[in-house]
Each structure stands twice: as structure tokens, then as C-alpha cells.
Image (cartoon, grey):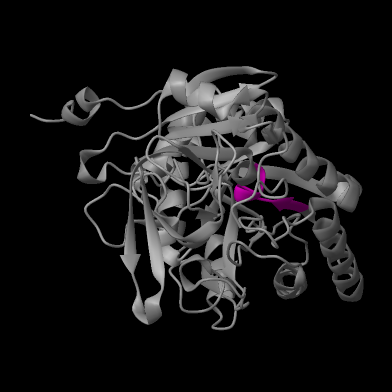
Amino acid sequence: MSAFDPAVFSRNSSFDFDHLTIGGVSATELAQEFGTPLFVIDEDDFYSRATAWKNALEIAFGERAGTVYYAAKAFISKEIARWVENAGIGLDVCTGGELAVAQAIDFPSSKIELHGNNKSEVEIRSAIEFGVNSIVIDSFNEIERVARISSELGKTQRVLIRVTPGVEAHTHEFISTAHEDVKFGFSLASGAAWAAILEISQHDSLQLVGLHSHIGSQIFNSEGFSVAAKKLIGLLSRYRNYFSHELPELDLGGGYGIAYVPGEVTLDPYQVLRELAEVVRDECLAAKLEIPRVSIEPGRAIVGPTTTTIYTVGTTKEVELDGGLTRRYVAVDGGMSDNIRPALYGAEYLAIIANRLPLGPNCNTRIVGKHCESGDILIRDIQLSESTQAGDLIAIPATGAYGRSMASNYNHVPRPAVVAVIDGKARVIVRREAIADLLALEI
């Protein structure tokens, strides 16, 4: 478990001689120059993954390929937004703050969609004024709000309906979003989705262009996506039969799984989209529908594997367990403030010593953070070298999604910097917070 695994680290990472190297820069050099904890993002890997999803969608759906929207919630910054634009894909934002990042770099508004289950009127107005391509409607209250604000601005806003198709995604409850008992979208089974369609049709300031579904996160096969697609195409057919014309777009969301630990395999975009395209074509043929323009929303699948977090070990200790066993606690200089996922829903990770070759045998280890919380655990159980000591660097890969974006200032700990590496060069794209930043909001 404690060995370097290329299937989990970013594509331009390797363990050369006696240290971890990312994008041609050693972990030791990165820690010395930028400090720890540190998010290190492999820029070339980001572009490769973004391009792969774009190419896979175009190959699978041909002229019916819609837009690959990068899900900003996974991680967004001005530099990341520039990479997204340079890769030729779109941007999926779900708050005014994420939209503001796009606005700050003048991201093409025609390639932005706005999500969110409780969009404020300020957020809706800002999105419409900026000219976002589409707003994904999530509730009946929102239909009225978007219609009214669009009318006030003298615009007709393109919208999609978020449908909860009742699909079990076989993932953790907190990241499963398409069964009935969730806060997102309009239930298909209850008739709410059809009622929303009828309601939207009453507003001249709204143009319904399609349906949207997102069944959850960290999904490792195409079965759930296929079931959702079948159900949504059934709703497209009902719409055609009632209104005598077809909706042109279908957004099947994201949630594509990545490898966090050895044995897991990151979902192949070409395979999953090829399988999905077959289902869409077959179902549309059976329903005598034109194939809609199909869009997707990968976030974690693009940025997740690109990033490694580097920590410095501060303390270690041995704890005796029942049965004569022992556990070694290795405490690092970060923790739940820079990666809440293990505490939030039991996410698992790999870790390695990054600054040297491990010595001696491995031992039962728990990697914990520095926060005043017993649940501040990054890795609950891992076999790590018994030689791990204060001053060592610990690298945890696959932290690009939801690490920095969910980061907090718990215990008034400043959030880490984000450094991009490529071709042996490193540069800061999000600076480390300082104590002055923590005090800046105080009155």
C-alpha cells in the first residue's frame, strides 16, 4: 500500500532514485520552495484529461456531440478556468462565486451553464446578464424567479430541467443524487418533472431546450448512466408527443470515477461514452426521436488525478491495541482543513514517503492531521514504513477534486497554496493564505 503506484498518481509523476518527482520537479524542491501542506497540480495531465473527454464525446456522438462542461465545484481558480478555455471545453458553475471566477477571466459566456438547487436572485440575475448558455432549473420556485428576471432584463433564457430519474448509483449516500429522497431536481416518478415542463411552457421568457440528470459521484461503470439515459429519453418522447416538436439537448451530468487507491481503475472516457452513445442511439431509434445533442459534466475525472498533496510529518507515536497489536500514528501539518473527504464520507487514499526510500518493514499506520478533532484522519489504515519520522514528506495523490475547493480554516489554519508543475518548472497559481488573510475580515 505504501509503494508508488502510477495508476493513482498523475501521469507525469514518478519515483526516481530516492524521491517523488511531479512534472519534472522533486517533492523535496517543491516543499523547500513553497512550503507544506501543498497542492501540486500536473498541468500537462489536466490538459490531457480534458482533451480526452472532449475527443471521446465527439467520437462517440459525432455531430450530435454537445459540450463537455468542466464541473467547477471540483476545483476552480482563474488559472484553472484559463486551462478549461484553452482545452476548448465549457464550464459548469453552481454559485455566484464560481461564476465570478469565470467572469474575472472573461470566460466565453456561451460555454457556461449554471447549476444549483437554491440559486439566489442575485446569482440568477448575474448569470443572465453575463449571457450564460443555459440555466439548469432545479425547483418550481426557480422557474418563477428565472422567468421573472429574464423578463425584466428583456431576454429569453435557455433552460434545462434537472430530472431525478430514481437511479441507484451504488455510491455513498452523501454523493448519490438521483434517487427520490434528495434535495436536487424534479422527480420523474412523482410527475414533478412533467409538471415542471408544463410550467416552463407558460413563460415566454424561458426557452426549454432539454433535460439534465446527474446520478451521483465516483461511479465506476456505465450502467447507472445508461439507465438514467433511457428514462430521460422516455421523457423526451412524451414531450414530443405532447408538444409536437422535440427537445434538442440532453445533459447526462458527471460522476465518473477515478482511482484513489491501488486496485481501483479510473473510468476510461472513450469506453464509457461509447457505451452511453449506443444506449442513446438505440432508445432514440425505438422512440423515433432524433438523437439530441449530448453534453456531460466531468469535474473530478479531469482534475482529481492531476493533483498530489505534500505534507511534512510533525510527530509520530505508537499506540497499543487489543490483542497485543500496535498502531503507529503519523501526524502531518495539514488534515481535515485541506481534505475533508475522509472525515465526511470515509474516502480512502494512498500515501507514500516522498523525500527518500523507505527503510525497514512496513507497520500498521494511521495518518492524521494537526486539528483538535479526533476525526481528523486522512488515512485510517495503511501499511507505511516504520522508519517514517518527523521531517519526512508524505505525498497523497488524487487530491485535485474537492481538496482545495472544500478546504476550510478550521482551527484558524491558513489554506495551502496550489502550485502548477510542467516540464520541470513550478509556479504558484493560488497563493498560500497568511495569518493576515485570516484577520482581514475582522472588524
Q: Residue at x 20, y 23 (%)?
A: 436
Would you say residue 282 is visible in this rendering? yes
In the rendered view, would you say 324 is above or below 69? below
Q: Quadrant of the N terminus?
A: bottom right
Residue toward you, 323 or 96: 323
Residue 19 on the magenta span: no
Q: What segment is highlighted magenta in the picture?
A: 294-302
In the rendered view, would you say 92 is above or below 280? above
Q: Quadrant of residue 341?
A: bottom left
Q: Quadrant of residue 320?
A: bottom left
Q: Quadrant of the C terminus?
A: top left
Task: List x then y, in percent, for residue 235.
Answer: 70, 73
Would you say 94 lies left or right of 167 here?
A: left
Q: Residue at x 40, y 39 (%)?
A: 96
Q: Residue at x 64, y 33 (%)?
A: 110
Would you say residue 154 is visible in this rendering? no
Task: List x then y, in percent, for residue 183.
Answer: 43, 68
Hey, which residue is sitting farthest front in the picture?
Answer: 360
Task: List x then y, in percent, for residue 135.
Answer: 54, 48
Task: List x then y, in percent, for residue 40.
Answer: 54, 32
Would you say 422 lies left or right of 386 here?
A: right
Residue toward you, 351 or 159: 351
